[in-house]
């Protein structure tokens, strides 16, 4: 590993990979460090993504697509199920990825573009010069290096510590973390082209259960529950076990993962002198769905483009990097995060009766016109106060 780069990227997830690839393509020197020994494992993800979101970054490739999703099902607490068909299911129609392959492919593309990539290389502290980040201390194979960089991109995911070490408050309150557990199950009776979402306080308090198919009889079956709802005997895995016993008594579990998803507002500022924060590290996963793959890729690329421009201008101060922060906030993604946070705050407090009423009334709507906005309209009908909270949003 060299000791000096234009850019240092901490983390080899989708955010870090897109950042490193973008910088390398512009011909600058960039180093990506990933603390795990292999990119993409262990997978901490249900692996779902809307089709139209990916086209922005790379053409679909069967080697990292496990399944194409054609429809989605929303199941109310009273077991009433409504089907969302392709035309009206919007971004629910998409792919279930194989992230072990997908994440590796993204980092491979960064390496191919010229990024230097290091695995089992952990950033353990920022190097601070005159109060600004100037690189990081990296531990690899029992050795410690100082790596200097003109700009550092923190793409270290939900467990992110780098920004905190650099003096930025990244704390997420417990109630704004969804605690998740997921089984990869085989031998289960599912529609291999349909994702399912189960709602209800008995099923998944302040969250939902998902079934994301990965082939015939094979699916990610997972749950996220509000962090504040978790405790002895009623942790995410306890709820998941109850669901699986009821729904798939014959199924076999071949993998278990646990993890967390932030459902809070994004960091109040995602740049500092010589540093930008992207993806989950910036708390940019969707507060309703928990989805964050696209958001990480989008902000990884945008952060890199902004940093390259700043480097070319010879000014990488916080003020010079601010266009990154400003741009993602006014983007479609930024606006969706703001709106969905307000909706989530109402959603997590709904009784099962209200959830039943909402799902039943959506089922009566002209399905050709279904969209997220339809869902929000029904939520507003059930909770008029939500209208006030959404009023200031465009
Ligand atoms: P990550 O993918 O988390 O990558 C960060 C990387 O940084 C990791 O590889 C980590 O090892 C590395 N790292 C951390 N600290 C250091 C360090 N100090 N030094 C070096 N490396 C470090 N999103 C979707 O879009 N669809 C879904 O279906 C979906 N399902 C999910 C289900 C679960 C159970 C969970 C937990 C999350 C789910 N998500 C989903 C969210 C999605 O996985 C994340 O939003 C996405 O991976 C964020 O990408 P990232 O690059 O920001 O972070």
Image (cartoon, grey):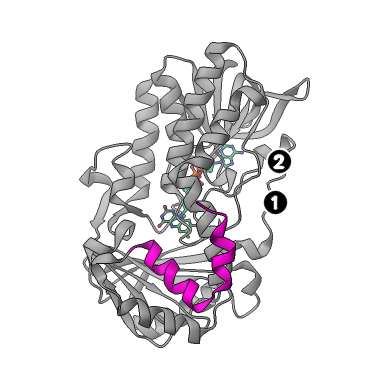
Residue 378 horizontal/vertical position (percent) = 43, 73
Within-10-Å neighbours for mark 1: few <14, some 14–19, many 20+ = few
Q: Which mark is residue 164?
A: 2
Within-10-Å neighbours for mark 2: few <14, some 14–19, many 20+ = few
Q: Is residue 157 above or below residue 5?
A: below
Rendered image quadrant of residue 392: bottom right
Q: Would you say residue 255 is visible in this rendering?
A: yes
Residue 365 horizontal/vertical position (percent) = 30, 75
- Residue at x-position 37% and y-position 55%: 47
Q: Is residue 293 magenta?
A: no
Residue range in magenta is: 371-394
Per the picture, the main secondary structure of the magenta-coloured stretch is helix
- Residue at x-position 45% and y-position 55%: 291
Q: Is residue 209 above or below residue 114?
A: below
Q: Are marks 2 and 1 in contact (CB under 8 Å)?
A: yes
**CA separation in Å, label 2 and label 1:** 8 Å
Rendered image quadrant of residue 3: top right
Disc 1: which residue:
171
Mark 2 Cβ and ligand 1 under 8 Å apart: no
């Amino acid at each position: 590993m060299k000791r000096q780069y234009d850019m240092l990227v901490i983390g080899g997830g989708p955010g870090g990979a897109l950042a490193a690839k973008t910088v390398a393509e512009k011909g600058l020197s960039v180093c990506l460090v990933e603390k795990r020994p292999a990119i993409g494992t262990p997978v901490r993800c249900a692996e779902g993504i809307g089709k139209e979101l990916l086209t922005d970054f790379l053409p679909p490739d069967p080697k990292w697509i496990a399944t194409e999703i054609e429809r989605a099902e929303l199941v109310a607490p009273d077991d009433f199920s409504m089907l969302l068909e392709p035309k009206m299911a919007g971004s629910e129609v998409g792919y279930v990825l194989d992230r072990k392959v997908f994440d590796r492919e993204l980092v491979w593309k960064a390496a191919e573009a010229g990024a230097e990539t290091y695995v089992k290389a952990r950033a353990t502290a920022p190097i601070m010069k005159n109060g600004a980040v100037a690189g990081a201390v990296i531990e690899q194979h029992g050795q410690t290096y100082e790596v200097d960089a003109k700009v550092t991109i923190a793409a270290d995911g939900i467990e992110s510590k780098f920004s905190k070490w650099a003096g930025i408050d990244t704390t997420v309150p417990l109630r704004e973390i969804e605690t998740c557990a997921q089984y990869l199950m085989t031998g289960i009776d599912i529609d291999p082209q349909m994702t399912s979402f189960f709602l209800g306080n008995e099923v998944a308090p302040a969250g939902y259960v998902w079934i994301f198919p990965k082939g015939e009889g094979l699916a990610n079956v997972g749950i996220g529950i509000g962090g504040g709802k978790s405790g002895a005997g009623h942790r995410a895995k306890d709820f998941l076990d109850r669901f699986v016993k009821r729904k798939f008594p014959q199924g076999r579990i071949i993998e278990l993962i646990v993890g967390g998803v932030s459902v809070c507002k994004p960091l109040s500022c995602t740049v500092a002198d010589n540093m930008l924060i992207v993806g989950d590290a910036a708390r940019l996963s969707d507060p309703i769905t928990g989805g964050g793959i696209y958001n990480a890729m989008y902000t990884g690329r945008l952060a890199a483009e902004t940093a390259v421009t700043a480097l070319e201008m010879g000014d990488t101060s916080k003020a010079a990097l601010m266009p990154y922060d400003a741009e993602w906030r006014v983007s479609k993604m930024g606006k969706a995060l703001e709106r969905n946070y307000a909706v989530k705050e109402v959603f997590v407090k709904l009784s099962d009766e209200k959830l039943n009423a909402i799902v039943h009334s959506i089922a009566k709507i002209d399905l050709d016109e279904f969209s997220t906005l339809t869902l929000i309209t029904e939520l507003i009908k059930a909770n008029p106060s939500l209208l006030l909270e959404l009023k200031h949003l465009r």
